[in-house]
Image (spheres, helix red, strand yellow):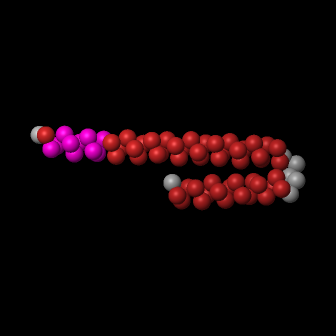
Amino acid sequence: MQGRWRRCETICAVGQDLVNQGHSSRAEIGSRIKSLMDKWNKLQDAAGSRKTRLEDAIEAQQVSQCFN
């Protein structure tokens, strides 16, 4: 995900530059930047939850193997 974050960050920076320069579609660009960042944050949350579930599953598997 780290590599994809760099791309996302670059896209948002370019978009923000357009907004700051007064681009005629600055409202839409700003909205899309916000939407992209919201989706990125949701993706990070989901990845964190998945990592936790996988770690829990590994631990449960190890405990199960100890008793078998």
- Which residue corresponds to the image point at 52% horizontal and 43% vertical from the top-left? 45
Image coordinates of residue 46 in percent, x first then y, are: 49, 41
Quadrant containing the C terminus in the rendered view: top left
- Frontmost residue, 9 versus 56: 56
- 59 in relation to 2, above or below: above
- 5 in relation to 40, above or below: below
Does 62 appear in magenta? yes
- Which residue corresponds to the image point at 52% horizontal and 58% vertical from the top-left? 2
Does 61 appear in magenta? yes
- Along the horizontal axis of the image, is 59 left or right of 27? left
Image coordinates of residue 41 in percent, x first then y, are: 59, 45
- 22 in relation to 32, above or below: below
Q: How many marks?
A: 0
**For the magenta stretch, what is the residue range?**
57-66
- Which residue corresponds to the image point at 74% horizontal and 58% vertical from the top-left? 14
Image coordinates of residue 31 in percent, x first then y, are: 75, 42
Image coordinates of residue 57 in percent, x first then y, are: 30, 41
Splitting the image into 4 quarters, where does residue 6 fall?
A: bottom right
- 35 in relation to 21, above or below: above
**What secondary structure prevails in the magenta region?**
helix
- Along the horizontal axis of the image, is 42 left or right of 56? right
- Which residue corresponds to the image point at 71% horizontal and 47% vertical from the top-left? 33
